[in-house]
Amino acid sequence: LLFPWQETLEAARFLLVFNGLALLLFGLLPGARKSGPVTERGHTPWYTDNGLAHCVVFSAAFLLGSDGLGEYSLGLYDLGLIFDLFPPVIGLLNIFGLVFCALLYVKGLKFPSGPDAGSSGNGLLFDYYWGTELYPRICGVDVKQFVNCRFSMTFWQLAGVSYAYKSFVLHGASDPALVFCALSQYLYLVKFFIWEIGYMRSIDIIVDRAGFYETWGCLVWVPSVYTLHSRVLVRGPSGISWMEAFAIFAVGLLGVGLNWWSDTQRQTFRESGGRCKIWGRPANSIEAKYFFVADPKTGRKEQRTTQLLASGFWGLARHFQYFFELMAAWSWGLLGAGGIYLPNGVLPLFYPAFLTVLLLHRERRDHEKCAAKYGKAWDRYCELVPYRIVPMIY
């Protein structure tokens, strides 16, 4: 057993190595250079599209460095260390997150990386919570891409692997629910890293500033809450059969696949400038015009034109992909709860319940943003695609 200070030291070492490797891969791995949407103040963010390479190399390094593959791994640490070090890791992340958000607050006011920065005018507490900069960079590293994707999503992805291994060690057998839960989440996050540039063009990035709400959330909330259902299974095995676990897994995997399909449709449409086919037909869209600040110093605005996709899944509902994401999330929650009769209680359902509220709120925020930005074109789009998330229902 380790004394508390020894655990904290081990947790600090783990986080330093974890983020050090992520930073190394962030700068060294090759990838195409891709842009996000132009901001209202005329700034275009650019990214290196090497998320999938990061996912593959980081996962391989994590597994090979552990003792989880027997003679095929280096045995430098126990594969279950993410579970063992979870309390001190979250404690350190909490402290770091609070301090880091304060530094980002000052940076956005005094040393911004671009024109989309400054106080909201709603006071210090709100600025700390919401952030003072849209696209902060530190030493050339995009803070959002690194924190939201390379740390947060990677931690979630590998936590499931670590928890499944720890459960096997503790109980001497694999828990079908935890195995399928970890596998489903891992595949979902492989999909995420393939689509990472799409995420960097989403409302989380192009609207939400890098403050406590988003940055602390990705540093602390995601590792804590998004892995909760898996952590419950380590101490409380599900007891369900492989067949029952596979049935729940299959529903979740269907959601992951459909979510990927819908995201791919939108990304293909955007990168082709609308010149593509979806479901065998030319993509249908509505032309929308909007203004952006071409010269932040003078406030001069220019008009641009974009296309609002109304084909494929995007022609059935404006955010059908949210429903697919919830299919996966509720499958993970049910696996964590031990099946449909919930022998592990309702705590493992907290993440899918939270995500449901989050996505319903996000849809409303996106609707308000688009209505203000595109005006009558958005009204026409809503007439063409009347359903928000689920066709014929909502």
Image (tube, helix red, strand yellow):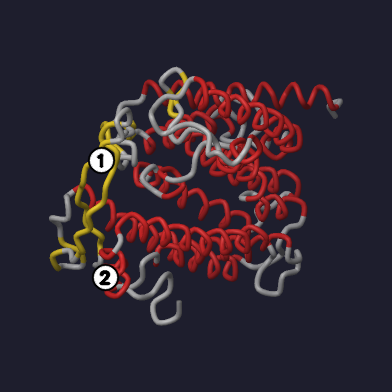
Total labels: the figure holds: 2
> Relative to 208, is 199 on the left or the right?
left
In which quadrant will I find the N terminus?
Answer: top right
Residues at discs 2 and 1 in contact (Cβ within 8 Å): no
Establish if 224 lies above or below 12.
below
Q: Is residue 204 left or right of residue 81?
A: left
Task: Estimate how packed mark 2 is, as few (under 14), some (14 to 19) or many (20 or more) residues with alpha carbons within 10 Å.
Answer: some
- Image point 21% across, 57% down: which residue? 307
Quarter where residue 156 is shown? top right
Tag shown at residue 301: 1
The residue pinned by badge 2 equals 380
Residue type at mark 1 is Lys
Q: Amino acid at mark 2?
A: Arg
| Sequence-first disc among 2 and 1 | 1
Question: Could you say whether the residue bearing mark 2 is in a helix, strand or loop?
Answer: helix
User: Which is in the foreground here, disc 2 or disc 1?
Assistant: 1
Q: Position of residue 224 (x, y in %)?
A: 67, 45
Q: Position of residue 262 (x, y in %)?
A: 33, 61
Displayed quadrant of residue 36 = top left
